[in-house]
Image: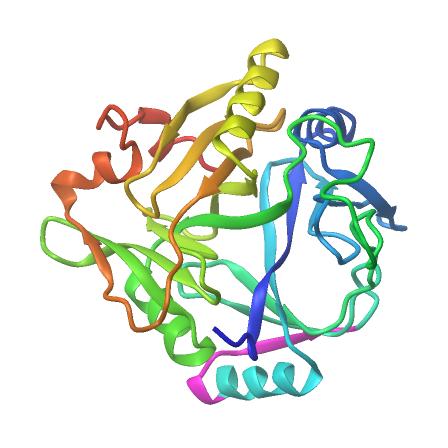
């Protein structure tokens, strides 16, 4: 698929209770690379194979969770195109000036019906992946921890899931790849993609607004999932589920928690999705199989421990 509009997930800003333990977790255990800090005390991190300056921003706060989730678009013209699409759709936008995030151009921010702050941007400082552009090796030296190759996606909790999915489809050209329907047939889960991945963002119903379920990091193989599980066990990182698999998206997974209680995921696999593919539907009674393909049993904390 030619990528000419919204390219990919670009960054997420997370609230953490204490910066020190959070940095140990994300740098030494997960294996992200610190690239910058700013005057507000925020710390900028990236996965090794990402080219831009950062994808994860940590901010110390009195409660955990997510501040905002950003997508990178092709260029400034594309940013203005989607700003107008959002405005014409009836969505209020806020323009965040260039430089408010380190090395990042102007951002267009809006709130979803589910209560989440989403933003679009076109420019971010190039950092590189530690490899040359001519005759590169397959990975750089010095990687730590689980060493994910990229920040992959987030799953968000809130109400108004059908309205939120419709906004992403009609104003932002996202594709609905999979959905979960409740006993009455209404959509309570939406998995949406701006690329050929199974999903770049997902929303699950909760009687609240603006909640974070998890931030996901991509690993290259099932063996790297196993390696990540070894790191979690060795270092007593709280694991919620896995290593396991999803029926939804077909991804291989482990869910675990950072020291502030924000849920993380290591993710591998999933299918290639094209816009002419049918939407996959999971019914209410088969949702445990869709989420926990090995075992078919819901983990209670999976629907309660959100930030």
Give above or below for 192 relative to 263: below
x 61%, y 61%: residue: 70
Residue 307 visible to an observer of this rendering? no
Residue 39, image x, y percentages: 90, 50
The number of numbered badges drawn on the structure is 0
Q: Position of residue 128 (x, y in %)?
A: 81, 55
- Rendering quarter of residue 22: top right
The answer to which of 160 and 245 lies nearer the viewer is 245
Q: Is 231 a magenta residue?
A: no
- Asked if residue 276 lies left or right of residue 3, the reply is left
In the figure, residue 142 lies in which quadrant? Answer: top right
Q: Residue at x 34, y 34 (%)?
A: 303
Range drawn in magenta? 88-97
Which of the pair 132/302 is nearer the observer?
132
List x then y, in percent, for residue 244. 37, 27
The type of colouring in the image is: rainbow
Q: Is residue 23 left or right of residue 189?
A: right
Q: Is residue 281 left or right of residue 160?
A: left
Foreground residue among 116 and 24:
24
Residue farthest front in this picture: 135
Q: Is residue 74 visible?
A: yes
Q: As rendered, which of 197 and 283 lies closer to the eye?
A: 197
Which quadrant would residue 233 be assigned to in this image?
Answer: top right
Q: In this view, which residue lies farthest toward the right?
A: 39
Measured as percent of width and height from the top left, residue 77 is found at: 66, 88
* Residue 94 on the magenta span: yes
- Residue at x 57%, y 22% (from the top left corner): 227
């Amino acid at each position: 698929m030619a990528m000419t509009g919204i390219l990919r997930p670009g960054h997420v800003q997370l609230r953490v209770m204490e910066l020190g333990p959070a940095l140990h977790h994300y740098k030494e255990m997960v294996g992200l690379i610190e690239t910058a800090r700013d005057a507000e005390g925020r710390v900028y991190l990236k996965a090794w194979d990402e080219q831009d300056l950062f994808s994860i921003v940590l901010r110390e706060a009195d409660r955990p969770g997510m501040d905002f989730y950003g997508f990178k678009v092709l260029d400034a013209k594309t940013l203005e195109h989607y700003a107008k699409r959002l405005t014409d759709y009836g969505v209020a936008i806020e323009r965040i000036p260039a430089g408010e995030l380190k090395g990042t151009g102007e951002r267009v921010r809006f709130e979803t019906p589910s209560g989440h702050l989403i933003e679009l941007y076109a420019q971010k400082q190039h950092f590189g992946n530690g490899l040359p552009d001519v005759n590169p090796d397959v990975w750089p030296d010095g990687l730590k921890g689980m060493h994910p190759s990229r920040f992959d996606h987030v799953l968000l909790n809130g109400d108004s899931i059908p309205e939120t999915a419709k906004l992403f489809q009609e104003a932002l050209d996202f594709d609905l790849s999979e959905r979960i329907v409740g006993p009455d047939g209404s959509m309570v889960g939406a998995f949406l993609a701006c690329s050929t991945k199974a999903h770049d963002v997902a929303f699950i119903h909760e009687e609240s607004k603006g909640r974070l379920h998890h931030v996901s990091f991509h690993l290259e193989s099932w063996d790297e999932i196993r390696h990540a599980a070894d790191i979690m066990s060795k270092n007593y990182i709280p694991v919620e589920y896995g290593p396991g698999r999803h029926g939804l998206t077909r991804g291989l997974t482990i869910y675990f928690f950072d020291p502030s209680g924000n849920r993380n995921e290591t993710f591998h696999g999933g299918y290639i999705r094209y816009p002419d593919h049918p939407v996959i539907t999971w019914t209410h009674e088969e949702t445990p199989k869709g989420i926990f393909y090995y075992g078919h049993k819901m983990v209670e904390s999976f629907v309660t421990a959100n930030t």
